[in-house]
Amino acid sequence: MPSAPIVIKNDPTLLFTNAGMNQFKDYFLGNKKAPYLRAADTQKCLRVSGKHNDLEEVGVDTYHHTMFEMLGNWSFGDYFKKEAIAWSWELLTEVYKLDKSRLYVTVFEGDEKEGLPKDEEAYHEWKKWIPEDRILMGNKKDNFWEMGDTGPCGPCTEIHYDTRPEANNDGHSLVNNDDTGMVMEIWNNVFIQFNRLKDGSLEPLPAKHVDTGMGLERLVRVLQGKISNYDTDIFTGTIAEVEKITNKKYLNTDSKQDVAFRVLSDHIRAISFCIADGQLPSNTGAGYVIRRILRRAVRYYYSYLNYKQPLLFQLVPLLSNQFENVFPELEKQKDFVARVIKEEEESFLKTLFNGLLRVDMFMSLEGLALHKGEKKEASILPGNVAFELYDTHGFPLDLTKLIAKEKGLTVDEAGFNVEMQKQKARSRAATAIDTEDWIILDENAQTKFVGYDSLEAAAKVIKYRKVKAKDKQLYHIVLDNTPFYAESGGQVGDTGELIFPEDSIQIIDTKKENDLIIHVAEVIPNDLSEPVLAKVDTVERKSTAIHHSATHLLHAALRQVLGTHVAQKGSLVNNEHLRFDFSHFAKVTDEELAEIEALVNEKIRENIPVVIKQMPKDEALKLGAMALFGEKYGDIVRVVVIDPNYSVELCGGTHVGATGELGFFKIEHETAVAAGVRRIEAVGGKAAEDFINNEFAQIRAIRESLKNPKDLKKSIENLLAESSELKKHIEHLEARQLVAVRNDLLQKDEIINQVNFIGSIVEVTSAEALKKLCFDLKNHLRDFVIVLCANIGGKPFAAVSIADNVVAAKALDAHKIIKEHVAPIIKGGGGGQKTLATAGGQDASNLQAAIEQVKALL
């Protein structure tokens, strides 16, 4: 079996594939029948968040990784413990020729609290192959595998290998108890027998399965006789490239420099393959995890390899070449992936610089407090400042600790953790979903989707459950037969109604959980066992289908006009509009947009039949069908053809019968989304008609406002030119006015403790004028402190300017004065530099009091 994408799209419990079994979850739960009884694969996995959080260990030790390859063999109700144990022993000892005297196995000892007995069957099978003293009993933590808080689970038997050079049949006590990673698990045979329910109880699964997982990186380490995963040829090529780029040497020690080499060689894999599978770095969800991994890597090369420019993107060509015959999706997109990574690195390096400035600002304020005797020593960076660096500038805590140490500070970690917990609590409150267990009405039935051919269907409810999210109660309903399309492939889920004999309920959305089609409702009838008629909202479905077919026409037009490098990077299709993200490294020009739009409309006028076929995937690809990176396809695929010479795509969405049904296509916007990714928003059908009508209505309104000129464009250009001239004239008058105000202010200069002080409320038209006055006065004064305030449209504004020598001699800071003395009085906020800072607020009645407050500081 090919690897599933590393980024998961239809499972609300996971962001990433974190185990080989994720793509087979529906088979284990009984939601779907496996098309085969046995399978084997190598699966791209990522473990950095949730239950399997290994990120902080990566690079520090020699055996944890972010992305790793999980080798697996699978039984779906076929072979079980006897065969799985025998075959794993045969592969390791007869095929791979591993030293039997270095192998140990663990077996589940049972758990009285769970009512689970010892795994006698596994123990008995292992006695056939290995001395009994090498069969060790394991507790629930180590030998009962669970994917998460709920879901498939069961006892497991692990195989461990002693890699210590001095090993002498004495590794028993180090199994699952070796922090050095020298005695390590290399294979896990999971016997999936149960489903964990929300209340913690276990229920037997419909059939027993085998899930085996063997980490390729650990296996290669054993086969190549290395003491570190990073010494194997999986990583040595990348480490050598980093040596070449940084002109530093990897010595395989625990030093921070060597940890940096290991971090880079690991993290570039996770970053690259996630982007190749369609997940761009962002500030939320899976995208934030990728950004966090990337920033951790940048922090290591910036701090410990003394490399101050983008480095990671330079490793992509080597990595893509290494995996070309295993995971070819990276080789096909290496330029795009490198571009995205480079821009992310450049962005964070700038952020890193800004964060360092923030630390310097804190140090300067601490120095002021020391000078004034408010503090005895500046030794602690407060937790809220450390959290600001994390939250605003993306600094991991250990980077802040490193910077603080260099400046003679320690970090208030307890305070940081308090702020972090507050944020997590806010996040949990915003995203918490309380899902109850399924109430099953028919445990043998499975869902059939009929929505391609019909928009209504007779059905019965298989199961349902209650869900609470953001204090709103919803219900999830699963039918045996449904015309409702579940959200996937960028297309939103259908809405409609379920009509029962005595009642009807509205379906407000349709979601997909793995392969389960879930109908979302706000209420349910008293009796869900009655027959039901499922009816899709036909108007919404038709408009959505129009936009989905338009997306295919647009994709093909983009490739024809811009080039075949264009690949889909995301989409949204609903009844109102379409949004299409694609790879392209420059802004699409107005001329190109016009050509793309014209080509799509030409295909609409040709009224081309939209032909949909089912065929083997390999056959579809030979026809030139475009498959999307990051999508998982079965052996039989659905192919949407709009003229074999124009658009052929693999697609599971709903479409029109012929392109003429689109009526008209209009591009609304073209923008940048991320590095190397552009976005087009467009409309078709009735939505396009409404868009054009609205645009013409606005033009008519503008024409009427201008007294219906013959040449509307020229009339607007004349207005703009006239406005520009008037602005210049006003600026000239204001400049003359400011000169007069400046001269008047110079007459109000008073000396307080050898400082020239000017404090006044002035009449100006903008906050910018206050700053201009400060700059102007600076040229006419020495040793000064200036406070200027103004009431502009009922809003208070203030500016504080201090001479450089006064800042030094009097330990005054305009930024701090504004923040601590002025802004609170005018009920506002502000900031700036030591020599010039400004504020705005809500209360203009206290401007004179603000001036007196600053004056009192002298």
Image: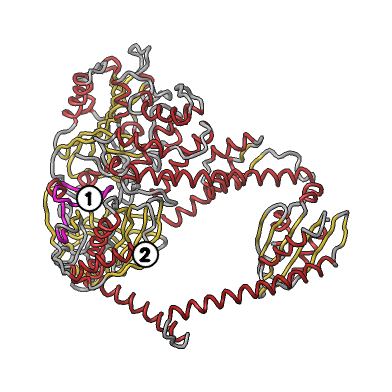
Dot 2 crowding, Cα within 10 Å, few <14, some 14–19, many 20+: few
Dot 1 crowding, Cα within 10 Å, few <14, some 14–19, many 20+: some
Corner quadrant of residue 100: top left
Q: Nearer the viewer, residue 101 or 348?
A: 348
Q: Is residue 478 visible?
A: yes
Name the residue tied to disc 1: 627
Task: Identify the image quadrant of the N terminus.
Answer: top left
Question: Taking 527 as reference, is 468 left or right?
Answer: right
- Write the residue at 16% across / 28% down: 83
**3D distance between C-alphas at marks 2 and 1:** 29 Å
Q: Can residue 532 be seen in this view?
A: no
* Amino acid type at mark 1: Ala
Q: Where residue 630 sits in the image (x, y, percent)?
A: 28, 47
Corner quadrant of residue 146: top left
Q: Nearer the viewer, residue 366 or 147?
A: 366
Q: Where residue 635 sits in the image (x, y, percent)?
A: 15, 46
What is the chief secondary structure element of the magenta stretch?
A: loop
Residue 507 counted in the magenta span: no
Q: Where residue 320 sits in the image (x, y, percent)?
A: 31, 37
Q: Over which residues does the magenta segment extend?
A: 622-643
- Name the residue at the bottom extreme: 707
Name the residue tied to disc 2: 590
Vertical position of residue 236 compared to residue 296: above or below: above
* Secondary structure type for disc 2: helix
Sequence-wise, which precedes: disc 2 or disc 1? 2
Residue 640 counted in the magenta span: yes
Q: Nearer the viewer, residue 63 or 710?
A: 710
Corner quadrant of residue 471: bottom left
* Amino acid type at mark 2: Asp
Q: Which of marks 2 and 1 is in front?
A: 2
Q: Which mark is residue 599?
A: none
